[in-house]
Image (tube, rainbow, N blue to C red):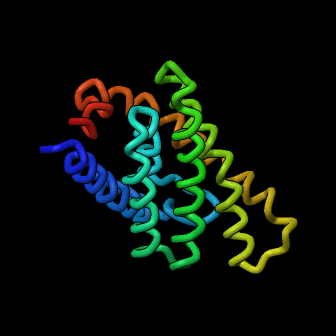
Amino acid sequence: MNQKTRSLAVNALVIALYVVLSWVSGLFGFAAGPIQFRLSESLNHLVAFNRKYIVGVTLGVVLYNALFSPMGWVDVVFGGGQTLLGLGLVYWLGPKCSKLWQRMALVTASMSLTMIIIAWEIVWTGHMGWDKLLPMFGTLLPSELVMLLLSAPVMLAIDRAVHFAKRVEA
């Protein structure tokens, strides 16, 4: 299988896995709203292993939001945009980090801080006063941070068996 086909196939699996893991989180009421604990957010760490995963993770967010978000296209734009921006920073700055733990820390910081975009979306679509923006961010940032901090060692353990970096290479 050539490298382009392999990368496309692996990213298609990431998209599917993101949707399923988000759906499971949604069953427990943790996939949307001011506190979000999407299991699928652990997949953001894939970009620390190989930058080619940015496609699968971002499209996973877009597809899940298109299919299941109560906010529809607005969540597709904001959620997809937040993921692309957060992981885009990792894509751009990641090569400057020589160690995997540094790139995973970058994923954690970038994705947590860009949750301000999701806070803005919730305040805007909920017709709330802008005085609610920072309190909303104050719940979203720690929920994303906790999910990424808890999932980092899990992703490292899975990587020992799966070798994420090599999955999208020929």
- Residue found 68% across the figure and 46% down from its top: 113
Q: Where 150 sits versus 4, above or below? A: above
* Quadrant where the image shows the C terminus: top left
Q: Is residue 4 left or right of residue 27?
A: left
Q: Nearer the viewer, residue 69 or 13?
A: 13
How many marks on residues? 0
Residue 46 placed where, x, y %? 40, 39
Q: Residue furthest top?
A: 99
Q: Where 154 sits versus 33, above or below? A: above
Q: Can residue 142 be spotted in the picture?
A: yes
- Residue found 65% across the figure and 62% down from its top: 118
- Residue found 56% across the figure and 39% down from its top: 92
Quadrant of the image occupied by residue 96: top right
Q: Is residue 23 left or right of residue 85?
A: left
Q: Where 97 sits versus 28, above or below? A: above
Q: Is residue 56 left or right of residue 4?
A: right
Q: Can residue 144 be spotted in the picture?
A: no
Quadrant of the image occupied by residue 61: bottom left
Quadrant of the image occupied by residue 125: bottom right
Residue 10 placed where, x, y %? 25, 48
Q: Residue furthest left?
A: 1
Q: Is residue 88 left or right of residue 60?
A: right
Q: Nearer the viewer, residue 22 or 106?
A: 106
* Quadrant where the image shows the N terminus: top left
- Residue found 87% across the figure and 65% down from its top: 131
